[in-house]
Amino acid sequence: MRIASLSPAVTEILFALELQDLIVCTDQFSNFPEEAIDIPHLKDHIDINPQKLYEHEADLIFTATVIQEKLADRLKAADFSVVHHDPRTINAIYEMIRNVGVMLHVESKAAALVLEMQQGFNDVKKKSGLLPRRLKVYIEEWHNPPFASGNWVPEVARVAGIDQFPIEQGALSPEVTLAQVQEWDPDLIVLSPCGAGLHTEKELITARPQWDALRAVQENHVRVIDDSLLNRPGPRLIEGARRLYGWAFEFQH
């Protein structure tokens, strides 16, 4: 089996399932764990040249989330064997992991990984349940124009003892206006621009015209998180939940 993992989340899952030796190439954002960096990377992750996949002799291709849906369709039309997942809730992420386990004959490892994630979330939830109150938080997935983090992120936030900007469970990340965020009046703002890692500055929002009217900006309650801890539907969402909980705890003590 020769796998092209064109999703950084799937790459992390494959490593967690100890299947990294099957990966022959990845997308440009697959940078965790560190060993993934040494695997050949293909650009652009939403418009990958099929010829590159032929060159790597990939016989199974993984894509994920709505942004790669059209890429998956194009590759299927070119007669590639493609598995596309589009999880939008934590339970759907668990199901994706189980599906990968079944396809690659490591069901028990997949079940163990899901259990590890469930236990990790439960541990954070127990701690966050002791917080004096639930903070109102605005987590931003993109900045131009502004998009609030949707999909599974509001669930992760609730585990951490905070409430994300109002979004229906499992809904895609919505574009938002300053007026909507002002009405929410968040205690804390978390910047998590997709694909940026930690290469983001608070000024992305503090210097944004008129956004200095927000209480969280005025009180310097703006934080930057490695977006891969929130934007990738995989095992490290646990670390994202821990990070959010830590800020909620810090805010109230």
Image (cartoon, rainbow, N blue to C red):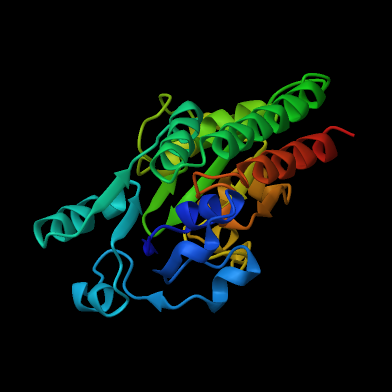
Total numbered labels = 0
The residue shown at (44%, 31%) is 95
* Quadrant location of the C terminus in the rendered image: top right
Q: Residue 37, percent across and down?
A: 56, 74
The answer to which of 140 and 218 lies nearer the viewer is 140
The residue shown at (65%, 28%) is 118
Regarding residue 98, the answer to whether it shows in the image is yes
Q: Residue 85, percent across and down?
A: 34, 42
The answer to which of 193 and 101 lies nearer the viewer is 101
Q: Is residue 231 left or right of residue 18?
A: left
Regarding residue 150, the answer to whether it shows in the image is no
Most distant residue in the right direction: 253
Res. 49 image quadrant: bottom left
Above or below, 61 against 163 in this view is below
Res. 215 image quadrant: top right
The answer to which of 52 and 128 lies nearer the viewer is 52
The answer to which of 106 and 125 lies nearer the viewer is 106
Q: Residue 44, percent across and down?
A: 31, 72
* Quadrant location of the N terminus in the rendered image: bottom left
Most distant residue in the left direction: 77
Q: Residue 75, percent across and down?
A: 18, 60
The residue shown at (29%, 48%) is 83
Above or below, 102 against 206 in this view is above
